[in-house]
Image: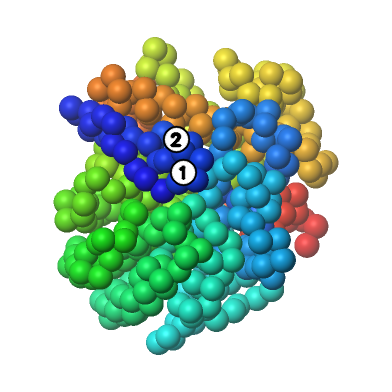
Amino acid sequence: MKFVVENISKSSGRLGHLVQAETGKRFRTPLLVQTTKAGSIPYLSREVFDYITKETPALQFSLSTINHMTESLKLFNGTIGAYVGYPECLSLLLVRDTCTTTPSGHNDKDIMPLFTRRGKEMLTATSYMDAVEVLKPDIYQGLCDADTNLDSSKKRITKSVDRTAQFMDLCYERHQNSTVLNNSGLFVPIVGGYSTFARSDSIKHAKAKGESITSGYIFEGFHNNGLSATEVDVEQLLKVMTHSLNELNVEKPKMMPGAYTPPAMLELISLGVDIFDTSYAYCAATNFKALTFNFDLTKTESGNCSPFLDITTDSLKEDFTPLLADCDCLTCKKHTRAYLYHLYNTKEMAGPILIMIHNLHHMMKFFNTICNCIADDKLPDLVKLVNYQGHDAALDYSIKLNTKAISRNDQGKSFTVAKDDQ
């Protein structure tokens, strides 16, 4: 895997390409990778996803949702992308599921907890690298202790950095000695919570031990995944990221996994972050929210004050307009708000499918616009539009759990489990 920087905007942001080692396919950055669960894009089959885009996708797999596939993949003797029906995709392997909140605690000296559908499993650096060699992703992250957030203590942050360094020592060794991973890129984790001092320590270890074999960097430990990523303190986040990016190799790609809000993504792209995932679109869909924020610089007039539409709102039951005017996704072309409200009320599985189609389409068009704005040196204008949507005050893009429709115990399990059914 290679990364090529093609253009750096005068104002902010940069354009580049990730180049797949074996095929030479190019994936434009800033890149939005498709989050998967158990190897599939949530709610969508391959055929349905083809209605959204015909472009070759970049897929993000999490070991916590596919670890049960490793035995079958040993017999398959192919890549994880080919195994799940996307042989041409760019595959990225993470440890944790960015769509679901990761429980805190359960950490030990030489192991880290892996929370799977079968329960908690203990992962060592050796067993992790064994799994990576079976899955054969184009890019994979190094094993790390990312159990930190804004409220983490200094002791917890220090342990996070120390344990990550210990894990990565073995990962570096295995990566260098592995013939299977010759074409796989290693993204080194940078941890340390919201402490600039701890982040610097993590970066120092990454430079000292893995500078020559590192393909990129992945920033972990700002949140506990799931909805918590939509509520991060952006001001504190940008302070830490500005400090960290100044200490890293500019030419290597940087990734920020998690459901960061669109305004947060734009600010991070302005700093030089290159890769994000679609977990924000998923978190919105599972909480019955269709994305409606405006990112068209030719339409800056004031509109609705909300960046998304709550499908469970009773006022929609006789609203026969599409989710978003002028949207050309399959959902908006074929169906109305009233129909989606009906699907929610009747607990039909077509509901999450149609909302996910719209949300992914919306996010993908958003990232196309980002790339065009960087090329035209208009990213600051886009940042202002997305943040304010033509109003005086910045909008709140965080996603709250929709307890009217889904209980806390069932979050992430099923789109259609209603609270009154418990």
Left or right, 382 with reference to 346: left
Q: Disc 2 on helix, strand or loop?
A: strand
Q: Nearer the viewer, residue 121 or 194?
A: 121
- Give neighbour class at mark 2: few <14, some 14-19, many 20+ (Cα, 10 Å): some
List the single residue furthest toward the front. Answer: 179
Q: Is residue 243 visible?
A: no
| 197 relative to 404, above or below | below
- Mark 2 / mark 1, whichever is N-terminal: 1
Residue appearing at x 38%, y 77% in the figure: 170
Q: Quadrant of the C terminus?
A: bottom right
Quarter of the image for residue 274 reads top left
Residue type pointed to by label 2: Arg
Residue 296 lies, in percent from the top left, at 42, 19
Residue type pointed to by label 1: Gln
Left or right, 182 with reference to 189: right
Residue appearing at x 37%, y 74% in the figure: 173
Q: Disc 1 on helix, strand or loop?
A: loop
Residue appearing at x 69%, y 46% in the figure: 85
C-alpha separation, residue under disc 2 versus residue under disc 1: 6 Å
Give the residue at mark 2.
26
Q: Is residue 7 visible?
A: yes
CB within 8 Å, label 2 to label 1: yes
Quarter of the image for residue 271 reads top left
Quarter of the image for residue 389 reads top left
Residue 176 lies, in percent from the top left, at 37, 68
- Give neighbour class at mark 1: few <14, some 14-19, many 20+ (Cα, 10 Å): many
Residue appearing at x 45%, y 46% in the figure: 21
Which mark identifies residue 20? 1
List the single residue furthest toward the top. Answer: 298
